[in-house]
Amino acid sequence: MTLDYLPYLLLAIIAVVFLFAAIRILREYQRGVVFTLGRFTGVKGPGLIILIPFVQQMVKVDLRVVVHNVPPQDVISRDNVSVKVNAVLYFRIIDPERAIIKVEDFMAATSQLAQTTLRSVLGKHELDEMLTERDRLNAAIQEILDQQTDSWGIKVTNIEIKDIDLNESMVRAIAKQAEAERLRRAKVINAEGEQQAAEKLVEAGRILAQEPQAMQLRYFAALHDVASERSSTVVFPIPIDLLGHLVKGSGEER
């Protein structure tokens, strides 16, 4: 009796193996690139996928954004400064067919392309531009990468320069430059203040010259300020015009 059920048992095992090999389940962010006898036959998913065992093969592709850390690159800027630069690359697959068929390993290819593009673009700019214009450099690198990876079915969404490492001598040189720049700004601000003060003094002199009584009021105000200070020394300001008259009078007597 047991031998009579053996063929059915074998058929049941074969059916289970067949179903196990034929059924695939893909998540919402996954797609399956299907090949039938080695030829591309379509992209399927998400959900339940049924394949013909031993005839069809499927390669899973993840459509989520991939975050890739670009290794530090030795870059020589246009002003001959050696720096180490690393970045973060964000990309995703928009065409699973091209990502699997057009390139052997899209992850490695994108990483190598990002490294070479990073060195090429930054090498055309000076160090000051790398430090102050990162947004513009990020946009330029992203545009080049996006154009190159479009044929692979990959969309580069963003790239961000993380760190720019300088040697100690260059750090000291930049610090000296920043200190000199601060001193220059301080001198310019001081000179502008002196210029504005001189302009106000000239304007005040013109106003006082129009009204002689105003000069007397300023004279009394100065005496009041001196008297309010607890000092044994009293200074009496003498108008310059009076000194001029005295000098003129002594000259005429001679």
Image (cartoon, helix red, strand yellow):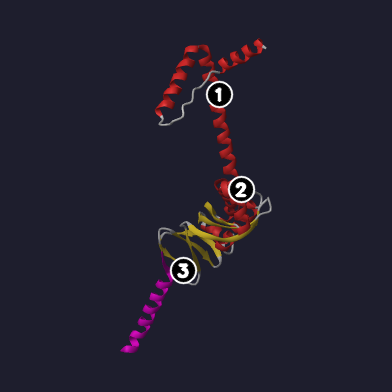
Q: Which callout, 3 or 2, points to the residue nearer the camera?
A: 2
Q: Which amino acid does label 2 sit on?
A: Gln
**Residue 143 on image: x %, y %:** 58, 48
Q: Which callout, 2 or 1, points to the residue nearer the camera?
A: 1
Identify which residue, 149 or 153, lies in the foreground: 149
Q: Which amino acid does label 3 sit on?
A: Ile
Q: How many other residues sit within 10 Å of disc 1, few (<14), some (14-19) or many (≥20)?
A: few
The answer to which image quadrant residue 194 occupies is top right
Q: Name the residue under label 1.
A: 199
> Which sits earlier in the primary sequence, circle 3 or circle 1?
3
Q: Distance between the residues labelled 3 and 2?
A: 70 Å
Q: Mark 2 points at which residue?
A: 177
Identify which residue, 238 or 49, lies in the foreground: 238
State the extent of the magenta-drawn residues as a range.
1-25
State the SS at label 2. helix
State the SS at label 1. helix
**Residue 90 on image: x %, y %:** 51, 55
Image quarter where the N terminus lies is: bottom left
Residue at (49%, 22%) from the top-left corner? Answer: 236
> Which sits earlier in the primary sequence, circle 3 or circle 2?
3
Q: Mark 3 points at which residue?
A: 52
Q: How far apart are marks 2 and 1 (CA)?
A: 33 Å
Q: Is residue 97 above or below residue 147?
A: below
Image quarter where the C terminus lies is: top right
**Residue 250 on image: x %, y %:** 63, 13
Q: Residue furthest front?
A: 254
